[in-house]
Amino acid sequence: MTRNSFPQPITRQEEVEAKQKTRRVLKGFTKKRANLIPILQAVQRKLGYLPRIAMAEIAIFLDIPSVDVYEVVTFYNQFRLNPPGKHSVRVCLGTACHMKGGYITLDAWERRLKIKRGDTTPDREFDLDTVACVGCCTMAPVTVVDEKPEAKVEPTKVDGLLLAFEREKQQTSEKPQ
Ligand code: FES
């Protein structure tokens, strides 16, 4: 089953930069199809995600159809089609979190942020994804927000966490420059 949804649009400037960076990464590889996954991993490390333009460059380099690259990217959970947000939200769907309602938590984040897992909000504030067990099962259901595991994240806690971000953003914008 694929997880990623469609890539969101990026600016012309981002496209140009992504193309240049992808070409630089490609210089470190030989033109063998077997290199596809290592190339995708290296490009994602560089860009933080795999935009259309990067996939197209990779397809040209390996002389394979773009759709083959796209299929691999959407098949593996490790690849992201969209740019990272300012804040990362990772909902744990390991066994303990799953048993304690991890999917309900995921649904709550998806509804509040109005995006699906694998996506980034249009303002690039949040990106949402899922993870396997993060090693703090007694706190289930867990959501890791900006690397910090949050315990017992049920829908009301999702609201609380988002409110805290909203307040923080307001306070930052009210601070005298
Ligand atoms: S299953 Fe979620 S922290 Fe272990």
Image (cartoon, rainbow, N blue to C red):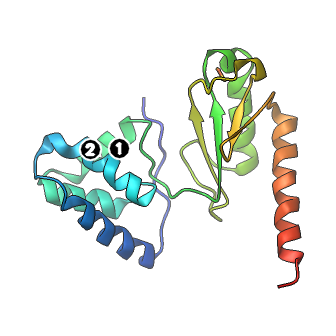
Measured from the top left, where is residue 52 in percent x and y?
A: 35, 60
113 relative to 27, above or below: above
Q: The N terminus lies in which quarter of the figure?
A: top left
Measured from the top left, where is residue 177 in percent x and y?
A: 82, 85
136 relative to 81, above or below: above
**Quick check: 127 left or right of 27?**
right
Q: Which residue is mark 1?
A: 73
Tell me what residue is drawn at x 73 percent, y 43 percent. 111
**Quick check: 115 left or right of 38?**
right
Q: As shown in the figure, which amino acid type bears the numbered disc 1?
A: Val
Where's ligand 1: which quadrant? top right
Tell me what residue is drawn at x 75 percent, y 22 percent. 140
Determine whether the residue tagged by mark 1 lies in a helix, strand or loop.
helix
In this rendering, the label closer to the viewer, 2 or 1: 2
Distance between the alpha carbons at the discs numbered 2 and 1:
12 Å
Q: As shown in the figure, which amino acid type bears the numbered disc 2?
A: Pro
Residue 58 seen from this side: yes
Measured from the top left, where is residue 6 in percent x and y?
A: 46, 51
- Who is closer to the viewer here, 13 or 87? 87
Q: Which residue is mark 2?
A: 38
Question: Within 8 Å: ligand 1 and the Cβ of disc 2?
Answer: no
Measured from the top left, where is residue 159 in percent x and y?
A: 85, 44
Tell me what residue is drawn at x 18 percent, y 44 percent. 35
161 relative to 143, above or below: below
**Quick check: 64 left or right of 76?**
left
Other-residue count near label 2 (Cα within 10 Å), few / some / many at <14 / 14–19 / ≥20: few
- Who is closer to the viewer here, 155 or 114? 155
Determine whether the residue tagged by mark 2 lies in a helix, strand or loop.
helix
- Who is closer to the viewer here, 18 or 4? 18
Tell me what residue is drawn at x 29 percent, y 63 percent. 22
